[in-house]
Image (spheres, rainbow, N blue to C red):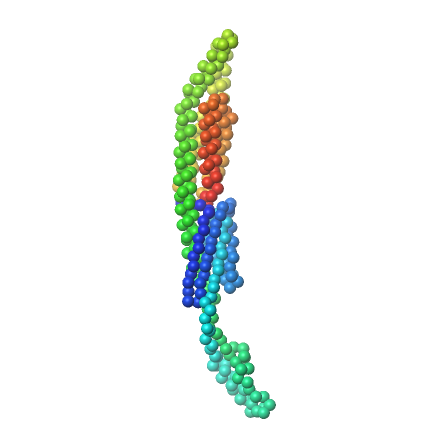
Amino acid sequence: MTSSMTAFARTQVEEDWGSLVWEIRSVNHRYLEPAFRLPEQTREIESALREIIRLQLKRGKVECILKYQLVQQEQALELNDTLLAKLHSAVQSVESRFAQVLPVNPLEVLQWPGVQSTQETAAAVIHEAAVKGFRQALSQLTAMRQREGAELKAFIISRLDKTGQEVASLRTLLPEILHNQREKIQARLAQVRLELDPERLEQEMVLMAQKMDVDEELDRLETHIAEVRRTLDASDAVGRRLDFLMQELNREANTLSSKSIHSGLTQTAVNLKVFIEQMREQVQNIE
């Protein structure tokens, strides 16, 4: 399916502990170049996110931004009863020896490492929600790229149709163009009352016909047009191949222009260049 490289997606994941917001933007680029802006707490999932994006996208500069906010809640205070029991036993042992010297302050006991613990949202939970939100945003982005790609495909096909019509029209007109050129040369010779050897005149006509022989260029144009159509129907990334085909189409149009000795052929070459350039501009957006 033909896909564009330009798109935007935004998703928000709401949980009891807070919310996560993903924003993904993609623009044209020769290769796939993802860039992530993540909170420090989620840095360790970046490699997994890169693998996810690599499996879904082939080209484009993709900027991925994650923002998250935790809900401010009163945190329940929990005591480590096992540690407290050990501390109590140790304090009693000390007090039995220094009862009057070392009074025990309960607040100091609470400050002992590990005695207090607060319930915090586990990092794994946040990471799982971030990956889930990223997949949703990436799916939205891919869908938007495909919708725009379908529009680009329709535009290119319309220009291909016009290009094919120009080629077919020129192929039909070529015999008439050659006949008219022959008559013009004979008329000019008659005006100046200059007689040429019939054999020499025929040679000149053959040389002119050879100069105007563009059948090979027309054949290649038709071949390239058919290949562009097949490429547009391919299921993988086709942008680079289409760009190459646009170069080849333009090359043949330039050759037609260089061989032109008739205004009709010149006008056809100009029309072809216009249609090819219009297609080439849109091909730059295709993945």
Query: Which of the pair 5/47 is nearer the observer?
Result: 5
The relative height of residue 85 versus residue 126 in the rendered view (above or below) is below
Q: Residue at x 40, y 37 (%)?
A: 157
Q: Residue at x 42, y 45 (%)?
A: 148
Examine the image and state in which quarter residue 91 appears: bottom right
Q: Residue at x 50, y 62 (%)?
A: 42
Q: Give percent across and percent down for residue 139.
A: 41, 53
Q: How many numbered marks appear? A: 0
Query: Which of the pair 47/183 is nearer the observer?
Result: 183
Q: Give percent across and percent down for residue 23.
A: 46, 55
Q: Residue at x 43, y 17 (%)?
A: 179
Q: Residue furthest right?
A: 101
Q: Give percent across and percent down for residue 143.
A: 40, 50
Query: Which of the pair 68/47 is nearer the observer?
Result: 68
The relative height of residue 211 versus residue 56 in the rendered view (above or below) is above
Q: Quadrant of the N terminus?
A: top left
Along the horizontal axis of the image, is 124 left or right of 100? left
Examine the image and state in which quarter residue 11 appears: bottom left
The relative height of residue 121 versus residue 80 in the rendered view (above or below) is above
